[in-house]
Image (tube, rainbow, N blue to C red):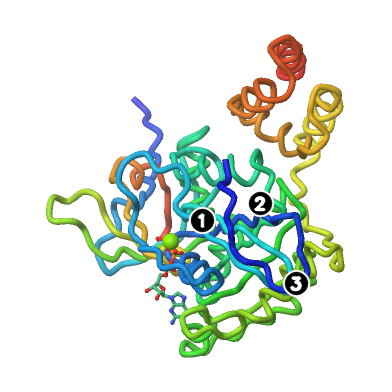
Amino acid sequence: MIKTNSLPVHGQETTKNFVIALAGNPNVGKSTVFNRLTGLNQHTGNWPGKTVIKAEGAFSHRNRRYTLVDLPGTYSLHASSTDEQVARDFICFSRPDLTLIVCDATCLERNLNLVLQILEITDRVVLCVNLLDEAERKGIYVDTAMLSQQLGIPVVGTAARSGRGLTRLKDVLDDMVAGKIVTTPRQVVYDPELETSINELEERLTPYLPDWINSRWVALRILERDYSILDHITCTRLGSYPRQVVKEEVALCLT
Amino acid sequence: MNRIVIPNPLSLIDIPVGGSARVVNILTIGANRRRLLDLGLVPGSIIEVIRRSPAGNPTAYLIKGTQIALRNEDARQILVDTN
Ligand SMILES: Nc1nc2c(ncn2[C@@H]2O[C@H](COP(=O)(O)OP(=O)(O)OP(=O)(O)O)[C@@H](O)[C@H]2O)c(=O)[nH]1
Ligand SMILES: [Mg+2]
């Protein structure tokens, strides 16, 4: 799905190309961060037609090569629109090495909904609190250290239009892929009845799921009757026999 | 005949442009409910009515710091109070 790029690598030759998914609410500066990091010029409007991925670009930092994939801006990952489905499928099934979430410092509360949803899928997440300059103009100061502690992931403040914070951001992305940072993502705990169902379904599903997928997240989606995920997993990884088994397991849990 | 009088609950569509209200409940279920919750229409949220489009539908609201356009069919499903 990701095209390989041919950016020159300075210094030592590294073979692996790390893929970073760029996610966030609409209009929070994702493309600005993308352009700052990759140096590419990308127009910000929606592309006509059925564009699967908005844009991808490459950059190098500390002798490592990265491919950055700019995903459509969404308020959630519930696949209720094409944009949401594209973002969700990429974060979940294309298995990027990292997901970088960009959010708007002037309305953090709104943005944190998507952050928590992504943390239900993956623990390889860095949060970029962008538009710090706008926030400061409004008298809003974000305690990024506290936010990082509360969310259990690295948080970097930026003002991407002027480039503020972007070197730090690249350093943190690099520390993440180098395994120097261990995340402990905050998990949403649902009410006890739902938790019981989640655990039960998760246990039944686990034998049929590939090891890279978050089985709790799959269980949650299935409890919402979103079976599109099963199709993904079973078609790409397991063939059609286990898919039938999984559907039967699910039917048992839902009755 | 005795009739039980149920006070007419306010929905978001009843709030005039320039007014604001607090979300009490959302009447839809399933994917549509999920979508509205994800837009920030959670119980307790304060919503401001920014403007109505010339045709009267959709209407722009300020929800948790962002302007969001909602169809009136959706706004009707959102129960609010103005206290
Ligand atoms: N003041 C300020 N403006 C910014 C900053 N980052 C982005 N912007 C501006 O915010 C607007 C939206 O930025 P984009 O990068 O297009 O946002 P996006 O998240 O890619 O938007 P969508 O792809 O439509 O979801 C543009 O006018 C940017 O110039 C920032 O840190 N500070
Ligand atoms: Mg963009």
Q: Which quadrant holds residue A142? A: bottom right
Q: Secondary structure at mark 3?
A: helix
Residue bearing the label numbered 1? A56
Disc 3 and disc 1: Cα gap in Å? 27 Å
Q: Chain of mark 1?
A: A
Q: Report crowding for label 2: few under 14, some 14 to 19, many 20 or more residues within 10 A (C-alpha).
A: many
Q: Report crowding for label 3: few under 14, some 14 to 19, many 20 or more residues within 10 A (C-alpha).
A: some
As displayed, is residue A223 above or below residue B53? above
The quarter of the picture where the C terminus of chain A appears is: top right
Instruction: Give the mark nearest the N terminus, 3 or 2.
Output: 2
Identify the residue at horizontal 65%, vertical 50% (top origin): A117
* The label number, if any, that marks residue A165 in the structure image: none
Q: Is mark 3 within 8 Å of ligand 1?
A: no
Tell if the residue under mark 3 belongs to the same chain as the one under mark 2.
Answer: yes
As displayed, is residue B13 above or below residue B82? above
As displayed, is residue A255 above or below residue A188? above
Asked if disc 3 and disc 2 are in contact, CB closer than 8 Å, the reply is no
Residue bearing the label numbered 2? A118
Instruction: Give the mark nearest the N terminus, 3 or 1.
Output: 1
Left or right of B73, for residue A237: right
Instruction: Give the mark nearest the N terminus, 1 or 2.
Output: 1
Identify the residue at horizontal 35%, vertical 43% (top origin): B74
Residue bearing the label numbered 3? A148
